[in-house]
Amino acid sequence: MSLKSVVFAAAAAAAFATSAFAGDAMIMVHDQYARVSSPAAKAGAAFMEIMNKGEADDQLIEVRSGAAAKVQLHTHKESGDGVMKMMHVEEGLAVPAGGTRMLKRGGDHIMFMGLNQSLNHGDVVKVTLVFEKAGEVEIDVPVDLERKAGGHGHGGDSGHSN
């Protein structure tokens, strides 16, 4: 990994950490980033660590962004024939009290479909996470096209690329 990539990742992590408070729920978002598979891609994805520092379980029930025509919560599940398939998670994603929910490559993630413009390295995507208890949490998600799969934090997430 280049020094430029390490510096970018460290700066992005510090600059984009977000917290939200609502009642006894406290949601913190860390290490968020978005990526596309190519400059001409019509779809992209965002990944992050969502921490619930509150005393009550919460549920991420919706995600919104002006970056794409459609924005959904997705996951990968094995179909009956052993093939992994990406699926919309209509019921949302649980974030347990005192726990963490990882949105990572090859697992749960935010899917941008019908991108309104190209996502270039260093761009920032505005995203609103909607929680059942904590309400709306607005975050800035940096586009990081240099992050590699296979690791966590400033080096990438595990799984395959989107």
Image (cartoon, grey):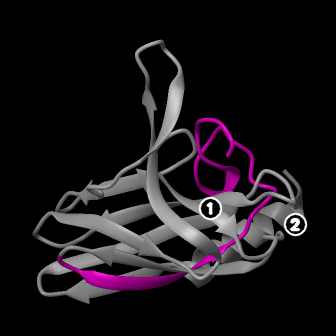
**Residue 80's x, y, as percent?**
40, 15
- The foreground one among 36 and 102 is 36
The number of numbered badges drawn on the structure is 2
Residue 149 is a magenta residue: yes
- Give the label, 2 or 1, closer to the camera: 1
Mark earlier in primary sequence (2, 1): 2
Residue drawn 26% across and 59% down? 95
- The foreground one among 100 and 38 is 38
Residue drawn 37% across and 74% down? 28
- The foreground one among 47 and 68 is 68
- Magenta region: 133-162
Q: Tell me the residue that label 1 is attached to.
A: 113
**Lateral position of residue 43 relative to residue 4, left or right:** left
Tell me which amino acid carries mark 2: Lys
Q: Is residue 94 above or below residue 87?
A: below
Residue 155 is a magenta residue: yes
Q: Tell me the residue that label 2 is attached to.
A: 4
